[in-house]
Amino acid sequence: MKIKARQTDRFGRGVRLLLCLCLGLTLYSAGSAFPAELSATGTRVTVTQAVSQPSLPLLEMKWMASPESVQDFARLTISKLSADPPFTSWKNAGTEYYPLGPGTHSWLVNVMDGEQRIGYLIITAKDQGGYMLSEYGAGSYGLPYSLQDLRQFLAQQELIPSNLSGQLELTALYAPLLPLWKLTIDNKTLYINASVLQVLPWSISKAEDMLHVKSAAAGAISSLEPGLAPLPAYQTGGQDDPYADLLWLTAPPLTPLSGDQFALALASGGSLAFQSPGRNEAFGAPFMITGCQSWDLSAPGPATASGRSAILYAASGPEGKRYLPLAALQDSGTLHTLASERSSTTLGSAPGAVSPRK
């Protein structure tokens, strides 16, 4: 009986050993088949990693030679802005020009340090002649019209089918205060906010209506008024997320503010919220304003042709990287105060810096 028991125990161990070997071979085979780029590295595999971006079709903007007058205005603007932070890296930077539809009424000017984008301008033709500075901003990430961000967004949202066999066309567009991507996949057209990436619920006809709205030339830097120069930018460091504290929704809209009034309201709360009731999607709203930059006469002299001595741009959106004309914001929507403690200045001097020079 003892001999038989030992034989049974030996047979059981042999069976268990065989099972372990089979399991090990199975795991090894599975591990070998797992893509190398998704292999365990001590961190969780993210959605971005799991969707192979290289598998997406090529996405690129259409390049077109820009008028010399656009380049002249861009060079002058970049030279002026590069005198102070956050634009000092623009000194001796290169530029790339891309047309923005509909038609070719606006231009995206990418400010480049080698192959890296470090800022941008959007320059728009004025009906009465010349060009205006529709918006601008500095940074190496988080700027409108980032192809890298767009690729990641499309991959995460799985907006391009993996078995795509038809045509894919990407077009950069610009509506007042709203950078846009138009993405056509076969017979389907998507409109995507090119600043804070989001698919807009627009039909083609609605998009055409929005895109044919004229940009307000008042309150923006003009190529016809070269005497204006920027003062140092002012940043409050306040809340830049409109959804972090929704109490601003209960605050009554501010009446249209002058430059000095705007600066004081901004400094007292650290942030102002912008919205356009019933039309938020048309302007990429709501978003926060956390700073400003004033353009003033570079030397004592008569007022500008428009009768103003200073033009104000509001630092808007995440981290206050987009500078938008304050006049255009107040024409398009309403500003609301955000109850918060006064924040410290991170750039420029106190709000008095936005006052016109004496």
Image (cartoon, rainbow, N blue to C red):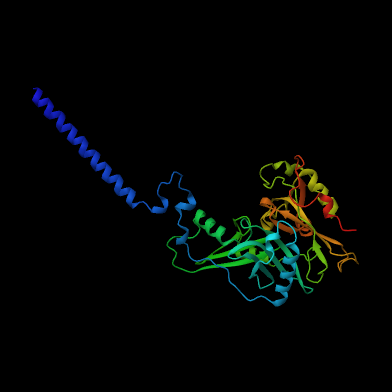
Say left or right for 299 vs 73.
Answer: right
Say left or right for 98 vs 3.
Answer: right
Q: Position of residue 114 (x, y in %)?
A: 60, 66
Instruction: Name the residue rendered at 51%, 58% in the picture.
Output: 159
What residue occupies the far front of the structure in this picture?
A: 92
**Quadrant of the drawing holding the N terminus:** top left
Figure check: 248 above or below 308: above
Asked whether the viewer can see residue 256, the reply is: no
Q: How many marks?
A: 0
Say left or right for 315 vs 15.
Answer: right
Seen from the viewer's position, the closer of residues 245 and 225 is 225
Seen from the viewer's position, the closer of residues 266 and 128 is 266
Please tell me in which quadrant of the rendered image residue 24 appears.
top left
Say left or right for 282 vs 5.
Answer: right
Please tell me in which quadrant of the rendered image residue 93 appears.
bottom right
**Quadrant of the drawing holding the C terminus:** bottom right
Asked whether the viewer can see residue 142, the reply is: yes
Q: Position of residue 88 (x, y in %)?
A: 70, 60
Seen from the viewer's position, the closer of residues 355 and 46 is 355
Q: Position of residue 339 (x, y in %)?
A: 76, 40
Instruction: Name the residue rendered at 73%, 54% in the picture.
Output: 315
Q: Position of residue 223 (x, y in %)?
A: 78, 71
